[in-house]
């Protein structure tokens, strides 16, 4: 197993907190498991804090200062806690930015990393029909900023399984949906992402509970993010992560091949392009 990464404390508030936490823990002669025990969290959770893949919340910062005899973490936690993302997704967004591999099953919508601006805007208006333009603009900007992860030609590896319902749901209308699907197809043709489609004909499957995102890291344990309507849960329990990894593998095995999936995506996009908008 690779050793811990040497974090650059200047790279982000999370990296600063993580580097200091590792230093203070080792100075106190505690293992990650020993530090996690009085906090009722796992050793892997502490490892993710140290690696900067998890956000340190104020309640943990207070306990860290008390256990380690410091006053550093509460003083510096506020900056790390700020996020442009909704509270339920902030920690997952942090982890996503550090992941080397992301695997995702999307049951309803094109995943955020693959959305176009128009598609994202339509999604947010659907979620918040009474929001102001400024609120929607900020949400869209944050989502498009996340997509910059894909400007690197190789990292992270992104493997997505789209339920066929994603293709058939014309979010924003036929024109917006067609453009969004063409965008996904273009990323596939550039070999930047792997996309499969789980057809309706597959019937019941192992991930019918909802959206699942699996994230693997170079120097931290894997995480699973489960998302519902306005809620999310980031899991680090090895048994839970393994269970969701197995469910994803079953879904991918039941899906169309990447080549067949690309053909279906482009076919549906072409159908939308020939529709007349009301």
Image (cartoon, rainbow, N blue to C red):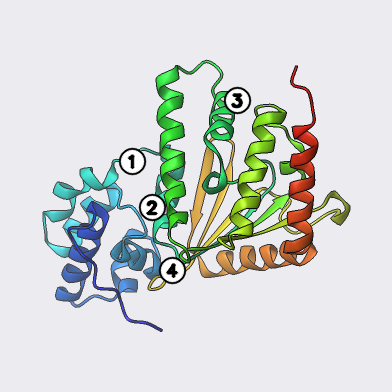
Look at 44% across and 63% down and name the residue there.
Answer: 99
Compare residues 142 and 189 and report the one nearer the observer: 189
Look at 64% across and 31% down and name the residue there.
Answer: 176
Q: Quadrant of the image for the C terminus?
A: top right
Q: Quadrant of the image for the N terminus?
A: bottom left
Circle 1 residue: 83
Residue 188 picture quarter? bottom right
Local SS, label 3: helix
Decide: few, some or many residues near mark 3? Use Cα within 10 Å; few <14, some 14-19, many ≥20.
few
Residue 4 picture quarter? bottom left
Q: Are marks 1 and 2 in contact (CB under 8 Å)?
A: yes
Decide: few, some or many residues near mark 1? Use Cα within 10 Å; few <14, some 14-19, many ≥20.
some
Circle 3 residue: 126
The relative height of residue 194 versus residue 180 in the rendered view (above or below) is: below
Local SS, label 1: loop
Instruction: Tell whether 70 sits left or right of 249.
Output: left
Look at 69% across and 67% down and name the residue there.
Answer: 249
N-terminal of the pair, mark 4 or mark 3, is 3
N-terminal of the pair, mark 3 or mark 1, is 1
Disc 1 to disc 2, how far (Cα)? 9 Å
N-terminal of the pair, mark 4 or mark 1, is 1
Label annotation for residue 217: 4
Disc 4 to disc 1, how far (Cα)? 21 Å
Instruction: Tell whether 258 sits left or right of 51.
Output: right
State the image coordinates of residue 208 (x, y, percent, origin top left).
Answer: 74, 51
Label annotation for residue 94: 2
């Amino acid at each position: 197993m690779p050793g811990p990464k040497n974090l650059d404390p200047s790279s982000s508030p999370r990296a600063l907190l993580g580097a200091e936490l590792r230093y203070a823990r080792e100075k106190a002669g505690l293992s990650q498991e020993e530090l996690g025990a009085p906090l009722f969290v796992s050793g892997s959770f502490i490892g993710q804090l140290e690696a900067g893949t998890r956000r340190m919340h104020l309640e943990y910062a207070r306990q860290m200062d008390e256990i380690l005899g410091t006053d550093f973490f509460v003083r510096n936690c506020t900056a790390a806690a700020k996020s442009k993302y909704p509270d339920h997704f902030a920690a997952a967004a942090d982890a996503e930015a550090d992941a080397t591999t992301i695997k995702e099953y999307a049951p309803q919508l094109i995943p955020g990393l693959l959305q176009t601006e128009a598609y994202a805007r339509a999604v947010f208006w659907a979620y918040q029909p009474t929001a102001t333009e400024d609120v929607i603009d900020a949400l869209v900007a944050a989502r498009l900023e996340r997509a910059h992860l894909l400007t690197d030609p190789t990292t992270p590896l992104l493997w997505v399984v789209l339920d066929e319902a994603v293709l058939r749901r014309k979010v924003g209308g036929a024109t917006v949906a067609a453009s969004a699907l063409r965008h996904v197809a273009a990323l596939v043709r550039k070999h930047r992402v792997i996309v499969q489609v789980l057809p309706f004909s597959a019937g019941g499957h192992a991930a019918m509970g909802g959206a699942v995102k699996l994230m693997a890291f170079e120097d931290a344990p894997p995480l699973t993010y489960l998302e519902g309507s306005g809620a999310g849960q980031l899991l680090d329990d090895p048994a839970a992560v393994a269970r969701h990894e197995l469910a994803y593998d079953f879904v991918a095995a039941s899906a169309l091949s990447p080549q067949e999936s690309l053909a279906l995506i482009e076919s549906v996009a072409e159908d939308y392009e020939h529709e007349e908008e009301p």
